[in-house]
Every structure is written in C-alpha cells, then in structure tokens.
Amino acid sequence: MSSIVVAGHICLDLTPELGASARLDPGRLIDVGALRMGLGGCVANTGLALADLGAEVSLHSTVGDDELGRIIADTIARRPGLHADLHIVPDHATSYSLVLEPAGHDRTFWHHTGANAVFTGSELDVGSARLLHLGYPPLLPALLTDGGAPLEAVLRRARSRGATTSLDLAVVDPASSVGAADWAGILKRAAAVTDVLTPSLDDLTSALGPALGIPAQPAAVAAGAYADLLIEWGAAVVAISAGADGLLLRTASAERLARGGAMLAPLASRWADVSLRVRPLPVERVVTTNGAGDASTAGLLFALSRGASPTLAAHLATASAAAIIAGGRPTPDVIVAMLPAARALFAPEPPAVPDSPSETKEFSPDAPGAAGDGRRVDEELLRFGSPPTHAHEHVQPGSAPTSPAEAEPAVPEGAAQRPE
C-alpha cells in the first residue's frame, strides 16, 4: 500500500481542440482539431500531480465494466508512481467528461457521472497509508445520502487507522440532483473528521453561500470567512484557492493538529495558528486551467508529506498549479525552476522537521539535503514580505529577491501587500 491514497471521483476527459469558429450549429459540420484523451477528476488530477512531484500514490475509484474503464485502468498501470485500486461495477458506465475550452475562454464540462454515482468508499481499505485524500463529494451522490453519513464514515474509518484525512470539493450545481442537499450539514459533519480541507472559493460559495445566506464579498474577505467557519467545524488545515486572488492557508490550534493523523500530527507545533496568503505565480501564457486546483492540492499534500513549513507548502501549492496552467507538469525540475527554495523537498531523504527555531539548520540552496523546511528557506520565500503569524515562522526580511518565485512572498492576514 502506498503512503498516500487518493479516492473518489475519476473520469476520462475528452478534450477536442477548438478553434475560433467552433460553435453549436445544428445541421452543420464544424471543423475541430485533434482530440486529447486523458484521466480526469480529482483522483486522476491530484494523483498524477502527486506522482509528478515524486510520491507513490494508490488511486481508488469506481468504474464500469466497459472500454472506458479499461482505458483508465491501463493508463494508471503505465504511469510510474501510480497504483490502481479500482472497484468495477457492471451495471454502470464509466464516467467521462467532454471538456470544451475554446482559445481565450474558460472551460465548460459536459459530464456523465456514470459509476461515480455509486461510489461509497465501502470497498476502500487505506491499510498503513499515512494520508487519505478524498475528492469531489458533489459528484459522488451516494456519499451524500442520510445527511452525508457515508462521507463521514469513509473519513472516520481512515482516521481510525491512523491516517491523516484530506477532502476537496467541487462546485455545486444548484440545478443538479445534489443542489438541494443540506450542504451546511454535510460539510459540518465531514469537517469534524477531516484534517486538511482544500476547496476553491467557488466550491464553498456554491455549497454554503445560499444555504447560510452569506452575501457576495471580495475574494480575500470571503475566503477568510469560510476558512474560519471550516476550522470552527473541526478542520485542522484549510487551504482555499481563489484563482487570481491566490491561496489562503489557515490552521487550527496545536492541540487540534496533534490529532491530525500520521502525516500532520508530527508537524503540529510548526503548523499551528498560521494564517497567510500567497499570490499565484505568473505564467507567460495560459494554456489550460483544467486540473490546476487539484495540482495545488497535490503540492500542499506533498509538502506536508515531506515535513515542509506552512510557508513553503503554500508556495509549492501555487507553483504546482502554475505548472499546469502553463501547459506543463509539476515535476521536480519544473518546480525548482520556479521555486528554488523547494529543491530540498525532492531529495531522496526529506530533511527532519525541527521542533523549534534553535534546531533549524542553515539553508544552502545548493547543498544536498538542505533544510528545505527550515527557517532559512522561509526567509528566501518571504523577502519583501512580512513573516507569517506563527512564532516558529518569524524571520527578518532580507535583500531583494533574485527570482520570480522569491518575489511573491507569503503575506500574513492583515498585512499590506506590495504594489504589483
């Protein structure tokens, strides 16, 4: 069993290349480009990005006994770092999405839920895995029955085995069959047994905004309000992605983090009571936004698995998303080119996590096994910025940054940001 299990929604993404003339026009033949076919959904997107970064990952999903299901299984089997744990159901077709992404426009999905409709997680055994990441409950309707009892059960079973639990959401379509679900009740129940929550602001707004009567607010304000709510409901670490407004990372107390399972508990003193924001890394050209949010989650979880600081973890999340948006993959070489301070996270043996600043090693970006999670790495990331709001993260701003990654510091909540 891999140390990381990613479970939940999977599908096959079919993405035609669409030119400027592509449109729906009944009775007409519209010329389009080549078709890209690849794995999609949280399980594939997050799992592939984790494998790109260097993790060994087990993927658990439900697929049909059909050709699309066999393509998914074969694709996973051929990918280094991924291990398939697929539950096959004969009476449902495998899920797929038509991804329509005309040049210069945001994507649209035509989605068939298929076998995902009967995913309950009852076939999942995390074994000795240190982390279970579960994705897209809004697209897994069987998890939402009885007020979300099956969702809670999957997470609770993983915690009983000592694993850290992680949950990601998806946008809730109010016109869909799950649009009328009691999302406040479901997420309150799930958050109580979830250690890491990584939704987007759109996910939370669609699920909780109407239900709780939360009015539209600026992204930074809304993300902070939702993060506070999720921590109040019991989550230990909340990372909310807000597109061009960046990533908000907020954490609970050391006491709560100490109950965060095999991956999070050892970092409790280092990660407690943090609130910081990281702006997105710029890319020369936006190729796609498909899978960027899942890559961000993968970056955060990979950083956790390597004992990184909150600051470095947040920056690795944004760098992983940027790699996808630029049309690449979040491989170590790509990430280090954007974020030199992350180099040590890709060493064969991750550096030990210091319990206090006095135990932190000096950082040398070229030294093998450098303390990639240490205070000196955070200094590289925080130049031009104020330190995060945790005592163990305090550093003094240094000289001018020498790379684009260092020019985008983490900013504690309430601090003024540099002008763009």
Image: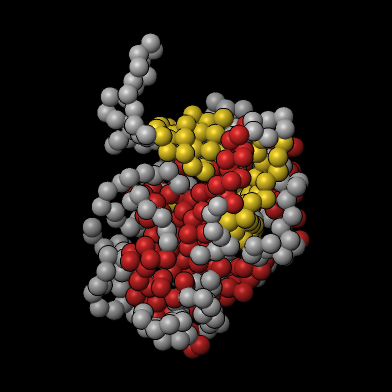
Residue closest to the eye, 384 or 11? 11
Which x, y percent locates residue 313?
46, 66
In this picture, residue 191 sits left or right of residue 320 = right
Colouring convention used in this rendered image of the protein: secondary structure
Residue closest to the eye, 162 or 395? 162
Q: How many marks?
A: 0
Q: Is residue 100 visible?
A: yes
Q: Which residue is painted at 74% across and 55% down in the image?
A: 125
Residue closest to the eye, 384 or 65? 65
Which x, y percent locates residue 119?
69, 40
Residue 104 image-quadrant placement:
top left
Q: Which residue is painted at 59% across and 46% down in the image?
A: 74
Which x, y percent locates residue 263?
62, 68
In this picture, residue 146 sits left or right of residue 205 = right
In this picture, residue 420 sits left or right of residue 28 = left
In this picture, residue 337 sits left or right of residue 209 = left
Residue 268 image-quadrant placement:
bottom right
Q: Is residue 297 visible?
A: no
Look at the picture and state if 233 lies above or below 342: above
Which x, y percent locates residue 218?
38, 46
Quarter holding the N terminus is bottom right
Seen as rendered, the residue at the extreme bottom is 358
Quarter holding the C terminus is bottom left
Q: Which residue is painted at 43% across and 82% down in the image?
A: 368
Q: Which residue is painted at 53% across and 38% down in the image?
A: 12
Look at the picture and state if 206 lies above or below 342: above
